């Protein structure tokens, strides 16, 4: 009887303590739920499903002043009409403007005409790697890390073949203009950066008549690329980057800088690789010996550099600077 009583008591003690633990867990949970919901109440809407979202406007006034979530990033047939101001500025960049309306009409009988990347929301976490062509990628072993991102956005002639360890092998988007174009594989989006109407004419020609072989220099008559994945940056977007992000410095923004801002508009989380100089201050491309310059005639290199640095300070991008 005594034994039984003891056992019973032990049983009750065990039951009580597990209940206490359960209760504690229960309250802890509701405490967590409580802090979580009051936190999201304070920071208003959850912008995306990543831990830090580009479009979280609450955390940087500097960013919100510049970032326009409503800007047309990519051209399509319904948003193609240009504001007089933008049209004037864009036309002045070129020596022989063609007929923009005519060119745009042809464009969308050939390439997809739709709204891309309008699926932003609290359930999306799209991670992007923007890969520049800096020599600081050499020896970085960033390849696997770069390929791990949902989108890998490269620019101009930066190759992957032979450099996979350091730059990765995946390319979902490549930003090019006729003078910097190269063959792409079938899964890559060709994203044209049109500095002039002739660039758009070249794009059409490259997929049809192949008659344009010269701009201010020789350009390929055609390239391998998937026609169904062609996209064109909106001239209005280029102007917006120029106004809001480089504050009218230089003639127009560099490809690298435009690509970075492009990523801020189509991604939730942006990592940046291969920008800037090597640690001993040398500016060159990882795939060639020739030295490059961050301050070329037409771009505002120093200002762009400072803006990129600021984006990093404001937690809008993650910079990977390599080791060399
Ligand atoms: C963007 O557009 C939405 C709806 O048209 C509007 O409510 C919002 O104020 C706009 N945002 C900015 C920064 O212009
Ligand atoms: C066009 O530019 C003029 C001066 O350059 C400016 O006053 C005007 O507000 C601009 N209009 C638009 C729609 O941006
Ligand atoms: C451009 O082409 C369209 C349609 O062919 C024509 O109506 C328009 O007048 C042309 N614009 C210029 C500036 O030549
Ligand atoms: C073109 O893009 C705009 C946004 O810039 C979008 O509102 C519109 O629906 C798109 N048009 C087509 C045909 O997809
Ligand atoms: C490339 O992809 C398209 C569909 O987007 C397909 O129709 C075409 O056959 C593919 N070409 C090659 C060479 O795989
Ligand atoms: C950014 O662009 C919007 C319109 O696209 C404009 O209203 C705003 O003043 C710009 N901000 C800066 C800092 O240039
Ligand atoms: C770019 O900006 C960083 C941070 O302000 C600075 O350390 C670096 O010297 C700048 N590089 C150039 C070339 O201006």
Image: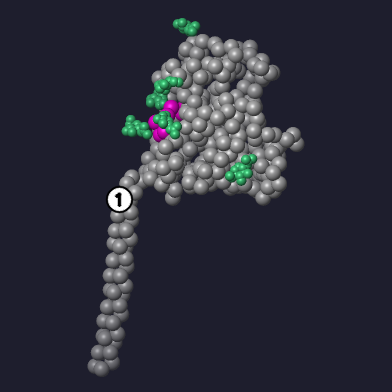
Determine if residue 121 is in view: yes
Q: Is mark 1 on a helix, strand or loop?
A: helix
**129 or 10, which lies in front?**
129
Residue shown at 53%/16% (left/top)? 91
Instruction: Give the residue drawn at x 55%, y 22%.
Output: 194
Camera-nearest residue between 109 and 35: 35
Residue situated in front as seen by the camera: 219 or 183: 219
Crowdedness near tag 1: few (<14), some (14–19) or many (≥20) residues, C-alpha within 10 Å: few
* Residue 72 is a magenta residue: yes
Task: Point out residue 235 in the picture as x, y percentages from the top left corner.
Answer: 49, 23
Q: Quadrant of ligand 6?
A: top left
- Residues drawn in magenta: 68-74
- Please name the residue that numbered disc 1 is placed on: 41
Q: Where is residue 297 in the image (x, y as percent from the top left)?
A: 64, 27
Left or right: where 269 falls relative to 20: right
Can residue 234 be seen here? The reply is no
Left or right of 321, for residue 21: left
């Amino acid at each position: 009887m005594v034994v039984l009583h003891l056992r019973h008591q032990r049983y009750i003690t065990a039951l009580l303590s597990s209940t206490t633990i359960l209760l504690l867990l229960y309250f802890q949970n509701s405490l967590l739920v409580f802090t979580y919901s009051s936190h999201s109440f304070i920071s208003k809407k959850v912008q995306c499903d990543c831990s830090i979202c580009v479009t979280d406007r609450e955390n940087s006034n500097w960013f919100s002043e510049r970032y326009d979530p409503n800007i047309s990033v990519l051209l399509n047939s319904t948003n193609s009409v240009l504001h007089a101001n933008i049209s004037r500025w864009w036309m002045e960049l070129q020596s022989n403007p063609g007929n923009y309306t005519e060119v745009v009409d042809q464009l969308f009988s050939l390439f997809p005409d739709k709204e891309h990347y309008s699926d932003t929301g609290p359930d999306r976490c799209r991670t992007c790697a923007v890969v520049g062509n800096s020599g600081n990628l050499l020896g970085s072993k960033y390849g696997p890390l770069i390929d791990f991102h949902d989108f890998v956005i490269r620019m101009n002639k930066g190759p992957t073949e032979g450099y996979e360890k350091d730059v990765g092998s995946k390319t979902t988007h490549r930003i090019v203009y006729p003078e910097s174009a190269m063959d792409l594989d079938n899964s890559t989006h060709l994203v044209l950066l049109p500095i002039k109407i002739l660039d758009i004419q070249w794009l059409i020609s490259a997929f049809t008549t192949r008659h344009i072989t010269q701009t201010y220099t020789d350009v390929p008559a055609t390239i391998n690329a998937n026609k169904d994945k062609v996209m064109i940056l909106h001239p209005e977007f280029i102007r917006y980057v120029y106004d809001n992000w480089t504050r009218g410095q230089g003639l127009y923004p560099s490809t690298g800088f435009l690509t970075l801002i492009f990523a801020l508009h189509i991604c939730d989380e942006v990592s940046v690789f291969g920008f800037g100089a090597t640690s001993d201050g040398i500016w060159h491309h990882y795939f060639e010996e020739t030295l490059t310059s961050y301050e070329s005639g037409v771009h505002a290199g120093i200002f762009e550099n400072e803006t990129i640095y600021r984006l990093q300070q404001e937690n809008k991008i993650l910079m990977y600077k390599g080791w060399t």
